[in-house]
Image (tube, rainbow, N blue to C red):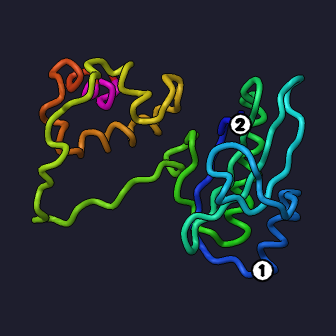
Amino acid sequence: MLWPALRVLSQGTLTSDQLQELLGMLQLVDTPRTEGPAAAKSVAHRSFAGAPGTRLVLDLARTGESGWVLTLFFDGEPPSDETVDSQRALLREAVERFGLTLIEITPAATAEEVHVPPREPAGAVEPTVGSVWDLPYADLDQLWAHVGLRKDAPREVKVIKLSEVMRSPAWPSAPAALQRQVESFLGGT
């Protein structure tokens, strides 16, 4: 079974020549991946060896009219941080080189890799759905996984994710202890 280790979501238009150049840059085979999550959206991929007994798969998939997803998958042991970091650099270089707009990288290593949805305009009607804290988290350590982060994620990424949680209509009804922990974390103490 393939598991994602790194996912880069970007948006933009590629000509067929640019697409072929991207495939060459990433050494992808012009054949869709047939296994693992979202294989039906795959455009091209390549498999290569990771740590002993681990196969890595780099995949390019489409999402919507102009969305592109580059994903590093693994089976066996998760790839090392060094492998993920080198693939992150390669994929960011590809996004930049082909003029795509970076939307999000998961897991994020910097603040610019976190997708921040646009704020609602002033005076917009408050949503009624989700205005009650119905999550089982009463502690900040429990909340990290809910926002898609590990406890050792970079602080700048955690700040952005926590700010998003605090913008939700449910935040005022979150447990008081959790609110204090988040405020303390954001205050740097």
Task: Give the quadrant of residue 98.
Answer: bottom right
Per the model, the C-alpha gap separating discs 1 and 2 is 28 Å
Which image quarter is the C terminus in? top left
Camera-side residue: 159 or 27? 27
**Residue beneath disc 1:** 16
Q: Amino acid at mark 2?
A: Leu
Whether 138 is among the magenta residues is no
User: Are the residues at dot 1 and dot 2 in contact (C-beta closer than 8 Å)?
Assistant: no
Can you give x and y, in whole percent of width and height, for residue 115 in the image?
A: 45, 53
The answer to whether 9 is drawn above or below residue 139 in the figure is: below
Looking at the image, is mark 1 or mark 2 nearer the viewer? Answer: 2
The structure residue drawn at horizontal position 40% and vertical position 53%, both measured from the top left corner, is 116
Task: Give the quadrant of residue 140.
Answer: top left
Which image quarter is the N terminus in? top right
Q: Which residues are magenta?
A: 182-188
The structure residue drawn at horizontal position 83% and vertical position 28%, both measured from the top left corner, is 54
* Label ID, residue 2: 2
The structure residue drawn at horizontal position 18% and vertical position 32%, both measured from the top left corner, is 133
Q: Amino acid at mark 1?
A: Ser
Whether 183 is among the magenta residues is yes
N-terminal of the two: label 1 or label 2? 2
